[in-house]
Image (cartoon, rainbow, N blue to C red):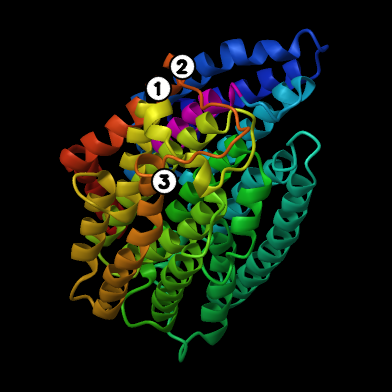
Amino acid sequence: MNFNITLVVPELYFLCLVLVLMIQSLGDREWKPVVEKWLPFGAGLGLFVTVTGYGLHGTMFWDVYKIDMMSQFFKIAIAFGFFVTVINASRQPTLAEGKRADYYMLLGFSTLGLMMLASSVELITIYLALELASYSLYAVIPLRAKSKGAAEAGIKYILFGAVATALALYGLSYIMASQHTTYIAELMNKSWTFADQPMAVVGLSLFLGGMFFKLALFPFHFWCPDVYQGASNETAAFVATLPKMGAIIVLARMAVFLKPGLEITTLLAVLGALSMTYGNLAALAQTDIKRLLGFSSVAHAGYIMLGLVSGTAEGLAAAAFYALAYLVMNLLVFWVVSRVAVDGRNLKLNDLNGLYKKAPVLAFSLAAGAFALVGLPPTMGFMGKFFLITSAWDHGYNWLVITLVLNSAIAIYYYLSLFRHAFTEDTAPELTPAPDNSWFASAGAGLLAAAVLLIGMIPAPLFNYAMAAGKSLMQ
């Protein structure tokens, strides 16, 4: 067994972080609240440790665990997402004081599983890492002070997750029986046409269903708006972003042997078109902001399929870049939602009325997030969609590119509703607490908004790194 400890320093750091949180969760009531005094610094150090390992590469554990440019790209994104989520949740009003250490411990376990998933290049290892990332979320979603909706959301997530897990495991058995290997590097050299390997194609379709569940791709999306609505705002910010990073990295690794024209590649394209269309149309009717963002994530899952079905290194790079853009854009919007709903309630669109007067920085940041999700320049959402479109055009799925453009036009209506309510409506609901207008709220929103705009104007450094990572997968 080959092992190099320097290659897994980020994973070991997060493992130690989780163990410290586990020990603290066993402490008395006076000790548990201390977690929010040191964890933001610990999460920030974790991001720094992950960034310092961006150039490492190698394989370990009988070649089932690979550290390469693509894995490091997603690990940095996951560490960044955990850092922002921890800071955002540090003022969570719907979490009991005695459960705070447990809450962060569960988020840490999920983050550790996602980081392991980023380097897994063997199907059984992918399955185990996916389960580690999922189990803690089953417990963390219901943690919302005496909320029946949160309990319902947790049950739905468990039930749908169990079905998706069963499908993935059943599909894995088909792949093993037909292709006689579970290593992605060896599966690249196998036939994936339905005429030659019908069992393998069916098995891979079922296995990918587990990834589609995490990504909330149609028709595995049913849990998404309900879970977002039932979970606390801060928990929804985590569930809406980080698990999708794990699903996208696995799909990117497996997309290298899904060439354009194959039956399963066409299936991904069709599901992508259905997902973006259904998600956008369903979002048009929403007044609850988190349900709106839930259906929005269904649409964005369809957008990412565009890069995965292109069969090119540019497509994989575009999918990775758009995944990072999706992470930052949604963290920004959920940050604003959490700061406006200082009492932890679910926000309606009307709750944003007059936000530009009460908290101008939050209103501007919300506008930046909404414009980015639409895909308007000069945001990173625009550049992400531009890279997806240019990478997929003239590779056999031009109809999917056109579908994306049409759906982006549909999405303008409900995303700009956020802007309209925040800037043009003055009749705010009565008897609701004022939004958090402190330096903490403004600084977090401002920095995330700056990232959305700056990366949109200067995307080359990140996209060039993603391009190098995509080319390394295609070799």
Q: Give percent across and percent down for residue 178.
A: 57, 78
Amino acid at circle 1: Ser
Residue closer to the observer: 65 or 83: 83
Does the magenta portion include 86? yes
Residue pictured at 35% horizontal, 51% vertical: 373
Mark 3: which secondary structure?
Answer: helix
CA–CA distance in space, label 3 to label 1: 19 Å
Q: Give percent across and percent down for residue 54.
A: 33, 32
Where residue 75 sits, quadrant-wise, is: top left
Give the residue pinned by disc 2: 438
Residue situated furthest bottom in the rendering: 195
The image shows a total of numbered marks equal to 3
Front label number (3 vs 2): 3
Rendered-image quadrant of the C terminus: bottom left
Residue closer to the observer: 379 or 163: 379
Give the residue pinned by disc 3: 421
Question: Which residue range is magenta in the image?
Answer: 75-91
Label ID, residue 442: 1
Mark 2: which secondary structure?
Answer: loop
Residue closer to the observer: 193 or 455: 455
Q: Earlier in the sequence, mark 3 or mark 1?
A: 3
Q: Are marks 1 and 2 in contact (CB under 8 Å)?
A: yes
